[in-house]
Amino acid sequence: MMDWNTGDRVVDHVLRNLEGFSTWREDSDAESTGQFLSGVISCRDMLPQAVARHFQLPNLFVGSAHFDRSQDYRRELISEVTSALKSGLVEAKADPQLERESGTDFSDRPRSRGEDILEALKEFSGDRSKASLSRLRAAVSPTHLQSRIKTIEMLTTRQRPYGNQSPELALLGELHRLESEAKNYFSEKM
């Protein structure tokens, strides 16, 4: 794995995801191929222009072609995309403008869902009001993190111990887990 350190944690996360996609197995079934294409498209859409220019990806779309056509078609499609990803990653890694100290402007990249969750979490941690909890709930609503919010909500009003922990300690643990898991949403556009 390459060590990405562009100075922008979202860009670093997306590049690590693209690195993972570059090793996708060519003998994937139609469902896995659809997931692969969706993932690559999501990552590509999150890249700022300074990084995206290194990736000469084929025309990517999610449709029924990979379901309707043969395994050979899927194998060729995946091979073409993974090859383009590998080339782009090598070019991006070699670009001195993408190093932390270069000061490259990444402001043209879209805001990520992970950043929105972390911002709402910071607001709630500083001000445990119903309004900040509502904002946090809205930030995680389209994700699998909703159960964390239900637990946080329950812990904010709980008086008795939660298992062998005080409600405050359990709440801090949930907030920490939510912060850690929110980083998985850096490659999702708002």
Image (tube, rainbow, N blue to C red):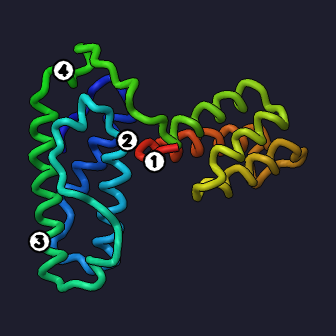
Mark 2 and mark 3 residues within 8 Å of each other at the beta carbon: no
Of pointers 3 and 1, the one earlier in the residue sequence: 3
Residue 46 in the image: state x and y as whole percent. Answer: 37, 41
| Relative depth, front residue between 171 and 183 | 183
Mark 1 and mark 2 residues within 8 Å of each other at the beta carbon: yes
The numbered disc on residue 91 is none
The CA distance from mark 4 to mark 3 is 33 Å
Pointer 3: residues within 10 angstroms few (<14), some, or many (20+)?
Answer: few
Secondary structure of the residue carrying numbered label 3: helix
The numbered disc on residue 97 is 4
Of pointers 1 and 4, the one earlier in the residue sequence: 4
**Looking at numbered disc 3 in the image, what kind of residue is underneath it?**
Glu
Of pointers 4 and 3, the one earlier in the residue sequence: 3
In this figure, which residue is indicated by the disc labeled 1?
A: 188
The CA distance from mark 1 to mark 4 is 24 Å
Residue name at image x 79 percent, y 31 percent: 128
Secondary structure of the residue carrying numbered label 2: helix
Specify the quadrant of the image occupied by residue 4: top left
The numbered disc on residue 46 is 2
Pointer 4: residues within 10 angstroms few (<14), some, or many (20+)?
Answer: some
The CA distance from mark 2 to mark 3 is 25 Å
In this figure, which residue is indicated by the disc labeled 3?
A: 76
